[in-house]
Structures are given as C-alpha cells and as structure tokens.
Image (tube, rainbow, N blue to C red):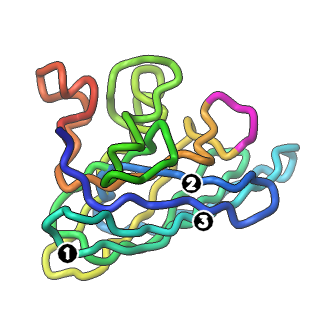
Amino acid sequence: RLRRHPGFSLFPSTSLFRSGVLCLEGSLAGPFNRLTIVHSSSSSHKVLKAKVKLVPATDTGKDPVYGLLTLIETSQGVYINGKILGLEPGKHGFHVHQEGDIGNNCDNALGHFNPQLVNHGKPENIDERHVGDLGNIETLPDESITLVSLFDNLITLVDGNMNNIVGRAFVVHAGEDDLGEGGNAESLKTGNA
C-alpha cells in the first residue's frame, strides 16, 4: 500500500482547459535550480499554463502539506515550478495519477497515469516509464519550504493528446521513488514510493 502525503488539485489558469482536478504523486527535486523557460519563436505551438493547488490529505498521521505549482507548456515541453510547505526532510515520489479524484486519502486517484501500459521508470527514460512518473522532489534538512523546479517532455496540457494530464491528480508520496530499480514487482508498478 502506498504511503501518501496530501493530494493536490490542478485547476487550469486559463479558459483553454475544462474544469477538473489533477492528482500527482511524486518525489521532490534536488536543490532548487531555476529553470529557464524556452519556446521556439518559429513554433506554432501555443504556450499553455495551469496551476495546481496542493491540499492536504486527512488521516495521514503527518503534518498537513500545502502548496502551489505552476505548469507552463511550450514547444519544448512542460515546466513545473512551485513551493510546497510541510513535507518532511528527504525525497518524496512525485507522480501524476490516473484519475483526478483525490478522495479517500488519494486512493481514488488510482495508479500512476500510464496510457502506454509500460513499467514504472525514471523520468528521463521516456520510452519506458509511465507518463505520470516525474521522479522525486527533495525537502532539504531544516527547510520548511520545498522548492519544485522540473521539466518534462512526455506530459502535456494539450486537450485530446494521449499524454494530457489535465483533470488528473498530482500526489506527493511520503516515501522515495526508487525509479523502477528496486528489483521487485512493486518497483516496476509504483517505484515503492
């Protein structure tokens, strides 16, 4: 059974999106590195934006976790930046889940978003990973705010695309994601997060 920190709802920030909830599980990124957002001026790809409001799950036995993420999609991929308050120090699995329902302490979000039906894996391995596998984010010791700054070119905010994450859930796990390298069946399903 997955140990989860609070689930987070994604609310689109523009009228480009239908109303919905996005659930994401995952781990924290390492020390904060500012992302430079790149968009080709010759691209016909429209820049898309969305916001994720992180809300705490109940009955976790842990302090509540809150935060806000901003997603920006350009011709290069999706940039995720934000701040999370209340996470314990260490790495935490960070994933997009199949459903947007974060009820029942995020169990209603079901498994990681995986439309290609492949094994769990590292975020940089776009040919063999769930679309929702975004790796880990990291809360540094003695820090009350976790800074999230990552880029992914497999997920999308484009309506009608098979890898569209709008309306799905972001979940931050209490445990670290082993990125599919744990040597057991659960690792290839969830990363043992």
Magenta residues span 158-162
Disc 2 from disc 3: Cα separation: 10 Å
The crowd level at tag 3 (other Cα within 10 Å; few <14, some 14-19, many 20+) is many
Q: In this view, does 143 lie above or below 23?
A: below
Labels 2 and 1 touching (C-beta < 8 A) = no
Quadrant of the rendered image containing residue 120:
top left
| Residue bearing the label numbered 1 | 63
Labels in figure, total: 3
Residue at point 45% right, 44% down?
96
Query: Residue 171, percent across and down?
Result: 37, 52
Residue at point 24% right, 28% down?
180
- What numbered label is drawn on residue 78? none
Q: Is residue 192 above or below residue 20?
A: above
Q: Residue 109 vs residue 39: left or right? A: left
77 or 163: nearer the viewer:
163
- Look at the image and say whether residue 25 sits in the magenta stretch: no
The amino acid type, in three-letter code, at marker 2 is Val
Disc 3 from disc 1: Cα separation: 23 Å
| Residue bearing the label numbered 3 | 51
Label 2: which secondary element: loop
| Residue bearing the label numbered 2 | 21
The amino acid type, in three-letter code, at marker 3 is Lys
Name which of mark 2 and mark 3 comes first in the sequence.
2
Residue at point 63% right, 61% down?
37
105 or 2: nearer the viewer:
105
User: Which of pointers 2 and 3 indicates the residue nearer the eye?
Assistant: 2
Query: Residue 33, percent across and down?
Result: 41, 67
Residue at point 32% right, 62% down?
6
